[in-house]
Amino acid sequence: MAVTHTIGRRKKAIARVYLKDGKGTILVNGKDYKNYFPTGTLQYKIEQSFALTENTGKFDVNVNVIGGGVTGQAEAIRLGISRALCV
């Protein structure tokens, strides 16, 4: 599978998501998503698309996100990942 590029938006946050086959690593602005989003609720929002489609640990994700607050950024990333999984 080639790299799939999608965009997710929520309020003022814009997330550019790059999804490819891999081992399940998720990077947000060059950091591990658990360091970028320290709370469990925000981490769950990032993982939610993979859990619902039973694809946990099958894809590597690299995200560039700007604008908004942390909740809006997490939800924009969730939308971008969902769109990438549909492709």
Image (cartoon, helix red, strand yellow):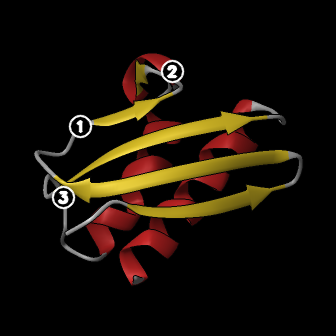
Residue 35: x and y in percent read 43, 16
Report, in whole angstroms, how far the alpha carbon at label 3 lies from the one at label 2.
19 Å
Element at badge 1? Answer: loop
- In this rendering, does residue 14 appear at all? yes
In the orientation shown, which residue stands out farthest toward the right? 12
Residue at 39%, 31% in the rendered image: 27
Quick check: marks 2 and 1 in contact, CB under 8 Å? no
Tell me: residue 25, above or below residue 58: above
Name which residue type carries label 3.
Thr
Quadrant assignment, res 6? bottom right
Report, in whole angstroms, how far the alpha carbon at label 3 lies from the one at label 1.
10 Å
Quadrant assignment, res 20? bottom left
Question: N-terminal of the two: label 3 or label 1?
Answer: 1
Residue at 66%, 60% in the rendered image: 8
What residue is shown with label 3? 56
Quadrant assignment, res 74? top right
Numbered circle sitting on residue 25: 1
What residue is shown with label 2? 36
In the orientation shown, which residue stands out farthest toward the front? 2
Residue 68: x and y in percent read 84, 36
